[in-house]
Amino acid sequence: MIIAEALAALWSLGQAAVAWLLVGAAVGTALLFSTAAGAWWVCRALRRAVRPRHRETA
C-alpha cells in the first residue's frame, strides 16, 4: 500500500510539473510574440518618420 501511495504522489507531482511547463511555455511564447510585435511597431514608426512625404500633383 505504501508503494501505491508513493506512486500516486509521484504521479500528481509529475502532472503538476507538466502543468507548470505548459504554463511556462505559454508565457514564453506570449513574450516572444509581444516582443516581435513591439519591434515591428517601432520599426514601422521609424520608417514612417524617415520616409519623405512629397506628393507631386501634375
Image (cartoon, helix red, strand yellow):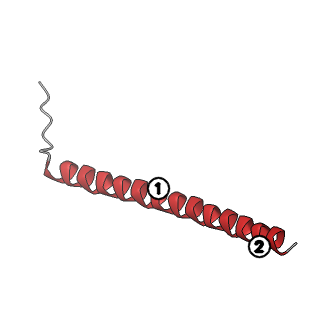
Given residues 21 and 34, the one toward you in this image is 21
Q: From mark 1 to mark 2, how far is it between C-alphas?
A: 34 Å
The residue carrying mark 1 is 29
Residue most extreme to the bottom = 2
Is 55 left, or right, of 3 in this rendering?
left
Given residues 8 and 54, the one toward you in this image is 8
Which image quarter is the N terminus in? bottom right
* Residue 22 position by quadrant: bottom right
Give the residue displayed 79% in from the left and 67% down from the top: 8
Q: Does label 1 or label 2 sit earlier along the sequence?
A: 2
Is 43 left, or right, of 32 in this rendering?
left
Is 37 left, or right, of 24 in this rendering?
left
Q: What element carries label 1?
A: helix
Is 24 left, or right, of 16 in this rendering?
left
Q: How crowded is mark 1: few (under 14 residues within 10 Å), some or many (20 or more)?
A: few
Give the residue displayed 12% in from the left and 40% down from the top: 54
Q: State which mark lies toward you, 1 or 2.
A: 2
Given residues 28 and 16, the one toward you in this image is 16
Q: How crowded is mark 2: few (under 14 residues within 10 Å), some or many (20 or more)?
A: few
Number of numbered discs on residues: 2
Counting from the top left corner in percent of width and height, residue 16 is at: 67, 67
Counting from the top left corner in percent of width and height, residue 35 is at: 36, 59
Counting from the top left corner in percent of width and height, residue 23 is at: 58, 62
Give the residue displayed 82% in from the left and 72% down from the top: 5
Counting from the top left corner in percent of width and height, residue 46 is at: 20, 54
Identity of the amino acid at label 1?
Thr
The residue carrying mark 2 is 6
Q: Is mark 2 on a helix, strand or loop?
A: helix
Give the residue displayed 66% in from the left and 65% down from the top: 14
Which image quarter is the C terminus in? top left
Identity of the amino acid at label 2?
Ala
Residue most extreme to the right = 1
